[in-house]
Amino acid sequence: MGKHVEKHVLHLQSEARALDADRNETGDKLGHAQRHIMVLEATIEALGALNENLMLALKELSNLKSSFEDKDRESKLEIESVHQVLSSTEKELEASKQRTMELEALYSKQSKLLESEREEVNQLKEQVKEMQLRLEMAAEEYRKVYAAHIRAERRLSRRQHSGGRSGGADDSGGGSRTRDSRDTRRTVVGSSPPDGETGEQKVTNSVPDQQTCISGSSGTVDENISSSSNNDSKEGAQAVGFGRGRALESLHDMNVCFVCPICSVTFPPGDSALFSSHFQNHLS
């Protein structure tokens, strides 16, 4: 019985030792597990912080993506606007080139027209100079006509006066004086030696038709009289025209026709007033 108890005690002791060993091993495992739990908790905390950081980074990335998308849209709009401006600029450039070509053509045409006008102006100036010269020649010729006519009137007046004094003379003498007077009326100014009594030129060149046409110019004058002739020449011509009008009043009684030196229009005898008006129209 005692042996049996001892065996049982020994067995319990061995079990107690085994339990102690298991307890120690379990304690070690528990410590190891606790340490592992602590590491896991630290890892979880780190992962949580990392997750928060990643979420923040993701948000920032999302914001950046949105910003980039907005900028991309703005860039696309700006690019489209630039394309539109470029297209409009190209159209304006094409239109500007077209206008430039038109202006160059117009400039060339205007240059040719200006050159033509300059040539016409030079021709007109030459015509004006020629017309002034012809007017001066006509004025000089009319002055000669007027002076010669005055001399002819004086001689005619003296002869008529002499005929009036010798009113009692015979018919043959009177007829001779009358014929001389008529011959004098039917004459035009010409070149002859000076008169012995007056020192003036004689009136010669009898006209068989009892009608003489007086012209103040040696040739036909161009009808295109330029309006740019200077006023002094006009005033001189008008002054000569006034003296010539007085001469024409005297020529009215001499059965003389008149030829305009400007347009070569012929006026019959007795139309001296019409001729004067016609010539003054040329001078005005």
Image (tube, helix red, strand yellow):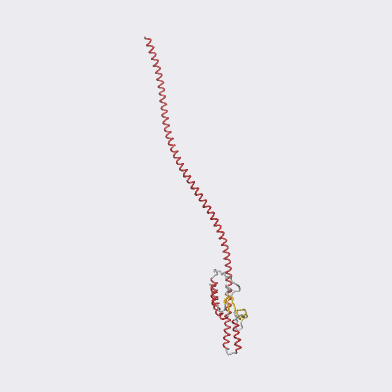
Q: Which quadrant: the N terminus?
A: top left
Closest to the observer: 36 or 210?
210
Pinpoint residue 253: horizontal percent, then vertical percent: 56, 81
Count of numbered tags: 0
Decide if residue 247 is on the left or right side of residue 46.
right
**Does 137 sit above or below residue 95?**
below
Closest to the observer: 194 or 151?
151
Closest to the observer: 40 or 111?
111
Pinpoint residue 237: horizontal percent, then vertical percent: 55, 74
Closest to the observer: 193 or 167?
167
Pinpoint residue 236: horizontal percent, then vertical percent: 55, 73
Decide if residue 39 is on the left or right side of residue 235.
left
Pinpoint residue 83: horizontal percent, then vertical percent: 50, 48
**Does 211 sit above or below residue 61?**
below
Give the quadrant of residue 36: top left
**Does 239 sit above or below residue 15?**
below
Give the quadrant of residue 6: top left
Give the quadrant of residue 126: bottom right
